[in-house]
Amino acid sequence: MCCTWAPWHPGIAADPLSGLLRAPAVRAGPGALRDAAARHHCYELQIGFTHLGWNVWTGNQADLAATARRLAEILERGPLPLTGD
């Protein structure tokens, strides 16, 4: 959520993912970081698609358009480079 909506809500522009990637418990888990960038990207897309559906259901055309633009940015950008080192 933080990565997806930070452009709209600067107060949530934290980067919890980097801290998670550095966590010893996560790094020790076999395969815990396998395909992490692609999985994170899928989570962002799922969040965006869910919000598209909500805005269609509520008839909020302004937020629907803004969500579609944000989703297009996420699709164009691709997976975030994940660094935990």
Image (cartoon, rainbow, N blue to C red):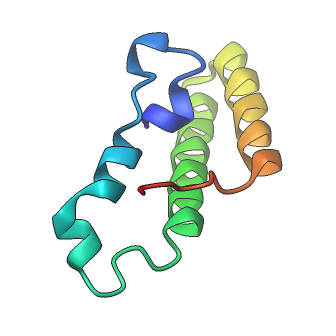
Which residue occupies the foreground of this view, 48 or 1? 1
Which residue occupies the foreground of this view, 69 or 84? 84
Which residue occupies the foreground of this view, 46 or 75? 75
Q: Residue furthest bottom?
A: 30
Percent coordinates x, y for residue 40 in the rendering: 51, 58
Q: Residue furthest front?
A: 85
Looking at the rendered image, the quarter that the N terminus falls into is top left
Up-down relation of residue 32 to residue 3 (above or below): below
Percent coordinates x, y for residue 21 in the rendering: 35, 57
Locate residue 24 relative to residue 6 in the image: left or right.
left
Looking at the rendered image, the quarter that the C terminus falls into is bottom left
Up-down relation of residue 24 to residue 75 (above or below): below
Percent coordinates x, y for residue 49 in the rendering: 61, 47
Locate residue 77 relative to residue 58 in the image: left or right.
right
- Give the total number of marks visible in the rendering: 0
Percent coordinates x, y for residue 55 in the rendering: 59, 29
Residue ID at (74%, 54%):
78
Residue ID at (52%, 23%):
6
Residue ID at (57%, 15%):
8
